[in-house]
Image: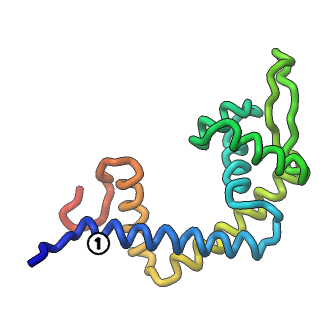
Amino acid sequence: MTTPDPEGALAEQLLRFTRRVHRIQKRHLELSDLGVTPAQSRLLRTLNHFGAPPRMADLAERLEVVPRAVTTLVDGLEANGKVRRVPDPTNRRVIRIELTDEGRETLRELHRARQSAAREILAPLTGLERAVLGELLDTLVDGAPSAHCGIPGNG
């Protein structure tokens, strides 16, 4: 007789959900016809969160990838006019990466595509279910229970 494995079942559900999210986001990204891959999209979003143009090493660290992967992504985005390499104003040996106007417009379109994907993914949920899901996801991301979680028995 086997014992139930609720954590295993949850892990499988999370994996299936993650695959579904990626599949839907990829489809919406392709529908937007922006000419960027999901990895390039992530780099553009990350680049946009820096206060000043970062070095490639900074991007690699933030994206948690090897620097060579960032170089490949930047090469493709630069070829499409979405980013450009610029010398550091204080050390001309250092190269920084900045968004172009086209890159900023692509980010706006990416945001719309992601919103559209989120609407599709969350469509089956009520407002209350979305709020609870958001709190649960915050708890999982932060690794600590939310003080505001509206689930009975939680703070």
Front position in the image: 150 or 143: 143
Tell me which residue sits at (68%, 60%) in the image.
38
Q: Is residue 85 left or right of residue 151?
A: right
Q: Amino acid at mark 1?
A: Ala
Residue 23 position (above or below residue 76): below
> In the picture shown, does residue 74 fall above or below 154?
above
Q: How many marks?
A: 1
Protein image colouring: rainbow
Q: Residue at x 31, y 60 (%)?
A: 149
**Residue 19 horizontal/vertical position (percent):** 51, 70
The x, y position of residue 119, in whole percent, is 59, 76
Mark 1, secondary structure of its residue: helix
- The structure residue drawn at horizontal position 31% and vertical position 69%, both measured from the top left corner, is 10
Q: Quick one: which residue is furthest to the bottom in this view?
A: 124
* Closer-to-camera residue (104/32): 32
Left or right placement of residue 148 versus residue 103 in this view: left
Q: Quadrant of residue 69?
A: top right
Query: Circle 1 sits on which residue?
Result: 9
Residue 122 appears left or right of 44: left
**Image quarter hosting the C terminus:** bottom left
Query: Which residue sits at x=61%, y=75%?
Result: 24
Q: Residue furthest left?
A: 1
Q: Is residue 136 above or below residue 51?
A: below
The quadrant where residue 21 appears: bottom right
Mark 1 closeness class: few <14, some 14–19, many ≥20 residues within 10 Å: few
Q: Residue furthest top?
A: 90
Q: Name the quarter where the N terminus is drawn.
A: bottom left
Q: Residue 97: x, y in percent?
A: 80, 36
